[in-house]
Image (cartoon, rainbow, N blue to C red):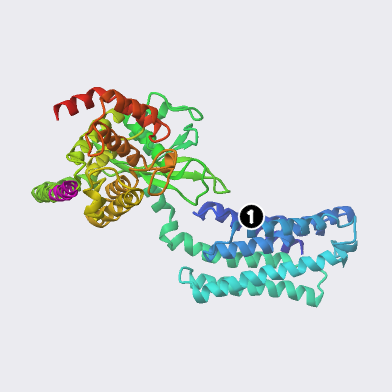
Amino acid sequence: MLYLYLICIIISMGMLLWLKLFDVRNSITQFISLLCIIISNLGFYFIAVSENLEEAILAQKITYVGGAFLPMVYFLLVAEICHIDLPRMVSVFFVVVQCIIFGFVCTIGRGELFYKSVSMYTKGGITLLNKEYGPVHTVHIISLFIYLAAAMATAVYSLIKKKSVNRRGMRAMIILSAIAVGVYVSERIIGLEYEIVSVAYVVLMIGALIPVYDSNVFTVYENRDIINEQLGKVGFLTFDKKRIYKGCNGFMSTAFPELLSAQVGQRLVNCSEELQSIIDQIDRLEQKYGKGEKREHIHIHLDPLLYNDKYYAGTIHGVSNAFGRLKGYTIELRDETEHYKALALREHYNEELTNAVNEKTRRIRLIQQKTILGMAQMVESRDLSTGGHIKRTSDVVRIFAKKILEANLGLDKKFLRLVVRSAPMHDLGKIGVDDAILRKQGRFTELEYNVMKEHSEIGYRMVKEILSDVEDQEFVSVAENVAHYHHEKIDGTGYPAGLKGEEIPIEARIMALADVFDALVSKRCYKDSYSYDKAFSIIESDAGTHFDERLAQVFLLCRKELEEYYDAN
């Protein structure tokens, strides 16, 4: 029997060596399975050569490293081979249960829960144990058969239902698993004095490694040579959440030599402008997803980069810990020079077509803009009290937008350009207001005023219907908000929705200042025009109640340009 145990140990160690040298997947589950078998087989050998009961009991506990954990690990291994993802908490639960069982194994010789009693005797120079099993041992046997039954059921199900598994390998695994179970059961039924469960362990693992062999040789996405070849064409640069540099691969350090002298664990300094522009794009990912959100995987695509006559493209990925929490970022960079050269060649031939399309698009947008402006002017021609209001407010918004850009309030030029384009549409909804109200000379009654207030809702619906599907969604959204909410007030007393503070879209808050200012300095049927001093005084006093306080302060800085504009017009 000693030779049998030694053969099982040698075979197990040979399988572990093979796994280490040739398993391109480096499966930790397979590694642990073989480690359990080796330790258990060593335990059987140590029992056979024990010289006293204390040594034999310690060796018996070692054998249960396989007995307690191998069935569970084998089930997890079968699920892995069959490409079945078990929930993380299920695996954790299994481990905890088996640790508890192994804890009772450690009481052998000291308690009666796992073994009620244990004694030793020798036969043919080999030490053997007499064991009387306790109640926890029964639980252990039940768990063993549950894991093996689950593993067999998973393998059979995958063989029948899943096309992603190797059928030849799965059949071999099922047959050898059945043989291993048969060896174990036969030992128990026959009542052999000698432990041969070590043979069952070896047979069980050979069955599991057969489909692994096919995966390593024939499965393209697991082929080490292909993976290494592809990875050699991709650069990786990693940071933690505080932008502390954590490392890069050779591709990245070749593209950006300054990384060769970079210190891991510190912020990057003296970066090239191009590398810094890539790193700065992490801000876009944080703006899109937030800094601490729990997500499966977050990423954004990098803006294309031309550097040292090469074109690069790539992706910034969020790096999460085991609990799904964002812990850092990986910048993935690919050399797309050949791709962009091909594109450039194709663009050369399509240049005339592109120019023609762009010109047509420009003309269509111009026609659309003039149509919308014409509709707004038609509405204004019905309103006897607001002559020239559309043009003036549009120009005021244009002047205001320049000051906002200079004030660095976080609004970019593209967004402000959309607000300026949207300004003529802010009163478009008045087309749905009855002439008797719209053309009334004098102040409105409360009922008439409530009807007039409906123009913001009408305008919102009109803008949505006119622009949807013909303009990009960002412009549609800005124009809708301008038409809908330009009469809202910061303190929540405005209409139509009674929004407060930053609930009001910022484009509507910008429009509100231009709209009110023009109303103040213009003559209306129910009032004379106010002086510039009085108009700007009202804007200042209503900052924080009617108007956004920060925007109002910037608006006051436009006084010189606005006075010149109104004096000239």
Is the stretch drawn in magenta largely helix, strand or loop?
helix
Question: As drawn, is 323 to the left or to the right of 352?
Answer: right
Q: Where is residue 251 in the image (x, y as percent from the top left)?
A: 37, 38
Q: Nearer the viewer, residue 167 or 95?
A: 95
Instruction: Tell which of 262 and 543 is nearer to you.
Output: 543
154 magenta-colored: no
Q: Tell me which corner region of the image, top left, top right, bottom left or bottom right, holds residue 501.
A: top left
Q: Give the range drawn in magenta.
A: 367-382
Q: In this view, does 72 lie above or below 501?
A: below
Q: Residue beneath label 1, please?
A: 32
**Viewer-proximal residue among 184 and 518:** 518
The answer to whether residue 371 is magenta is yes
Residue type at mark 1?
Ile
Disc 1, SS: helix
Residue at 22% from the left image edge and 39% from the top image edge: 525
Q: Is 388 rendered above or below residue 535?
A: below
Name which quarter of the figure residue 393 lies in: top left
Viewer-closest of 368 and 143: 368
Q: Residues within 10 Å of mark 1 (few under 14, many from 20)?
A: some
Q: In this view, does 530 lie to the left or right of 143?
A: left
Q: Where is residue 220 in the image (x, y as percent from the top left)?
A: 41, 60
Residue 301 visible in rendering: yes
- Number of marks in the image? 1
Residue at the image point whose x is 31% and y is 28% from the top: 555
Q: Where is residue 258 in the image (x, y as percent from the top left)?
A: 37, 27
Position of the C terminus by quadrant: top left
Residue 195 visible somewhere in the drawing: no
Determine the residue positioned at 38% across, 46% down. 495
Residue 530, how many percent across, how many down?
26, 29
Describe residue 61's horizontal placement relative to residue 11 as left or right: right
